[in-house]
């Protein structure tokens, strides 16, 4: 990974530049799942602790956490969601199954 990060000259973009996003106001930002992948975390839950430490460092240095970290929820594609199809989420399927079971019990 160190070699890949070092490739910022000679027309090569760093991995951080490749995952950089820009909002409508022109502000750049990075999504944590993308950062975790670039930093070779195999499980995102292990990277969440790193984010919490970064938030604490931000606070301890006198900055407002809200100015530097946005809590964003984003639906990720899972094997189960792929199997069910994009239109039907696992939570919806469970509630549909419960309704079917109740209507069957009433008969």
Image (spheres, rainbow, N blue to C red):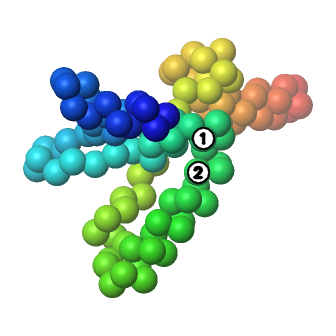
Q: Residue furthest left?
A: 25
Q: Which residue is mark 1?
A: 41
Measuring 72% from the left and 33% from the top, which residue is drawn there?
94
Above-or-below relation of 59 to 14: below
The local secondary structure at tag 2 comes to helix
Task: Write the residue at 82% across / 30% down.
Answer: 101
Question: Is disc 1 placed on a helix, strand or loop?
Answer: loop
Residue 66 at x, y percent in the picture: 34, 70
Q: Is residue 12 above or below residue 49?
A: above
Residue at 65% across / 40% down in the picture? 43
* Most foreground residue, 43 or 8: 8
Q: Nearer the viewer, residue 89 or 40?
A: 40
* Left or right placement of residue 29 versus residue 36 in this view: left
Looking at the picture, how far across and down is residue 59, in whole percent?
40, 79
Compare marks 2 and 1 and give the one earlier in the sequence: 1
Quadrant showing the C terminus: top right
Which mark is drawn over residue 4? none
Res. 38 in view: no
Residue 103 appears left or right of 66: right
- Residue placed under numbered mark 2 in the picture: 47
User: Callout 1: 10 Å neighbours few (<14), some, many (20+)?
Assistant: few
Q: CA distance from mark 2 to mark 1?
A: 7 Å
Indicate the position of residue 46 as horizontal and vertical percent values.
65, 50
Is residue 97 toward the left or the right of residue 26 in the image? right
């Amino acid at each position: 990974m160190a070699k890949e990060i070092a490739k910022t000259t000679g027309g090569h973009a760093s991995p951080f530049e490749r995952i950089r996003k820009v909002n409508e106001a022109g502000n750049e930002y990075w999504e944590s799942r993308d950062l975790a992948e670039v930093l070779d975390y195999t499980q995102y839950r292990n990277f969440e602790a790193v984010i919490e430490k970064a938030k604490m460092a931000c606070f301890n240095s006198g900055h407002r956490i809200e100015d530097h970290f946005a809590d964003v929820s984003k639906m990720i594609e899972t094997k189960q969601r792929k199997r069910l199809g994009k239109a039907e989420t696992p939570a919806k399927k469970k509630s549909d199954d419960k309704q079917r079971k109740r209507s069957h019990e009433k008969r």
